[in-house]
Image (cartoon, grey):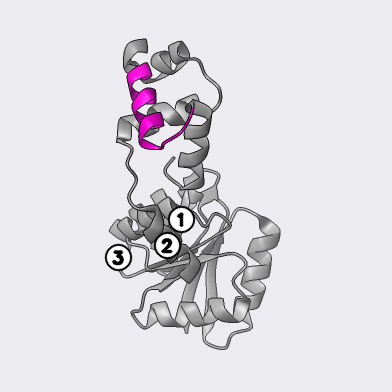
Amino acid sequence: MIRVLLAEDQAMVRGALSALLTLEEDIEIVSEVSRADQIVECALATQPDIALLDIEMPGGDGLTAAASLHETVSDCRIIILTTFGRPGYLRKAMESGVVGFLVKDTPASELAIAIRRVMAGERVIDPELATAALSAGRNPLTDREQSVLSVAANGSSNAKVARILHLSEGTVRNHLSSAIQKLDARNRTEAVHIASQKGWL
């Protein structure tokens, strides 16, 4: 039996996934969690073969949890199953030890096949997303530019961004200007939109 940990915050989606995968003769759901900060603890307790993780969850996010899980329970193979098929997310996932990345509109039969393929040592990536990730290229933003854009995303003024990140307003302006230029955006709002769509924030 392939032992699976399922991490998904939406109860209805989690229940449907669990029910569908349980119909497979060789797959057993050994634990279900609804928060990112429960994943590692639960994996340590149940020792699953596969962890099926969503990205956006309370208590953190699936990509950060995947990196921790990869370090802590190295035998557990990780598949990301998400609504958010963004190129930057795929790159982050691969860097975090993830070996499968699928979007939620994947048919249940294909998900079961993907679990078996990952269990056999293969990588399984949604082909459209893989193509998009290659065409999008690497994230051009520095860590500081990303953090400035992230804080600015909710409409905060330069002064407020500076206070939150303990920077001078001039430094914030410089980072925003650099990010806007790198993303070929007209303004900070467009820069935030582009970076978000690519999964770089």
The residue at which mark 2 appears reads as 43
Q: Earlier in the sequence, mark 3 or mark 1?
A: 1
Q: Main secondary structure of the magenta part?
A: helix
Question: Residue drawn 62% across and 75% down?
Answer: 107
- Position of 91 with respect to 186 (left or right) is left
Q: Rate crowding at label 1 as few (under 14), some (14 to 19) or many (20 or more) other CA atoms within 10 Å.
A: many
Camera sees residue 144: yes
Residue 190: x %, y % from top left: 52, 33
Q: Answer whether labels 2 and 1 touch (C-beta < 8 Å).
A: yes
The residue at which mark 3 appears reads as 74
**Tag on residue 25?**
none
Residue 124 belongs to magenta span: no
The residue at which mark 1 appears reads as 39
Q: Rate crowding at label 2 as few (under 14), some (14 to 19) or many (20 or more) other CA atoms within 10 Å.
A: many
Question: Residue drawn 48% across and 78% down?
Answer: 114
**Disc 2 versus disc 1: distance between alpha carbons?**
6 Å
Residue 149: x %, y % from top left: 43, 29
Instruction: Name the amino acid type tagged 1.
Output: Ile
Start and end of the magenta stretch? 172-186
